[in-house]
Image (tube, rainbow, N blue to C red):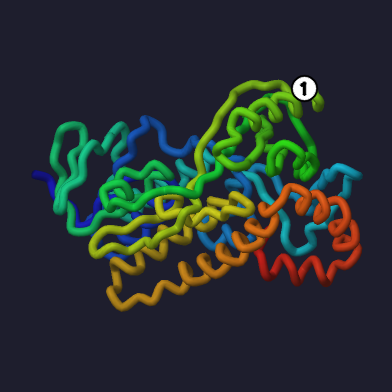
Amino acid sequence: MEKYEVVIIGAGPAGLRAARVLSEGGKDVLVLEKNRIIGPTVCAGGLTIKNFDFVPKNIIDKTFNYMVLHTAKRTYDVDMGSHPVFTVDRGKLGQWMSKEAQKAGAEVRTECRVSEIKDDHVLVNDKEIGYDYLVGANGSNSIVRKFLSIPVNKTLIAVQYMSKTPRTDLEIFLEDFKNVIKYDWIFPHSGFTSIGMGGWTNNAAMLRRSLDELCDKLSVEKTKFEAAHINFDYRGFAFGNRFLAGDAAGFTSGLTGEGIYPTILSGEEVARGILNKSYAYPGIKHLLKTKSSQENLLRILSINRSIPQIVFNNFLPLLLKRRNLCIMINNKYSIV
């Protein structure tokens, strides 16, 4: 039976970051990815400055120093100031991270589906591979999380078209809360546009209809439809010699849906913990503090559908006129 010190299931940003850090720390690492190609996934591809602690700026598609914010009453041009937003092609990001992990010494195998997990090995394409440490970095439907008997009860769904219609501006829509609490986005990339919506999982069909209506309204070609669940049901990440990272652990924000940064950071933190048993996980503590603040705000907005309408149609115009207050709120909730 083959055996590695660390087996990582999932070659997304969490798994690949963990693989790189572990390999640089001298561990024998194997990454198992069920898909043939590493990188492409359902994601709008938004980054903020904090992501550049982990990824180079030369792989980004576009930079936005302002966004166009649509509410039911009017449209605003919002200056992002020192918090610009960037877009990245998830395929390019995944390929870059995979190469960096392999350069550090990790082995990355594709088309490897894990069908069973045991206490000291996994079953991959009918072949046993042993491990000392196991990292589940394979998304909201993680087989490692299931093996650990950890339920997933809090999920969102993201639906999007990867459209060939070019768009110039980064746009956010906070307009219609009569039928469902949701937010819509347009993220321009080089050669394509992500136009999508995020909301509660049980409203998936309504979100799809609303997205089609938005595309028709804006004359955006509905080129390629994608949908994915987002797990924000965090219940821990370290379970003896087994760990969860990224969406498998539920580190994604339930308020904003931001996933790339918490995913990469959690992968790094898990790797640091494997390398050093006394590691205090400062990055994860910071993630959880921010996540708690954001989801407290989400609970307030979800009490009644009139609350977001009042906030975005009445309070927001006043807020945007007071830059210092905007900065203070963003510092507390890390919205961008």
What is the quadrant of the N terminus in the image? Answer: top left
| Between 200 and 75, the one nearer to me in the picture | 200
Q: Residue 169, position in %: x, y? A: 79, 41
Residue farthest toward the front in the current orientation of the protein:
304
What is the quadrant of the C terminus in the image? Answer: bottom right
Q: Is residue 136 left or right of residue 254?
A: left
Relative to 206, is 257 above or below? below
Q: Is residue 58 left or right of residue 119?
A: right
**Residue at point 54%, 32% (across, down):** 227
**Residue at point 88%, 45% (across, down):** 75
Relative to 270, is 149 above or below? above
Q: Residue 57, position in %: x, y? A: 61, 53
Can residue 334 be seen in this snapshot? yes
Residue linked to disc 1 = 216
**Residue at point 53%, 40% (across, down):** 90
Q: Amino acid at mark 1?
A: Asp
Q: Is residue 282 left or right of residue 310?
A: left
| Between 332 and 24, the one nearer to me in the picture | 332
| SS at badge 1 | helix
Can residue 171 be seen in this snapshot? no
**Residue at point 44%, 60% (across, down):** 266
Count neighbours of disc 1 (C-alpha within 10 A) and say few if under 14, some if 14 to 19, many if 20 or more.
few
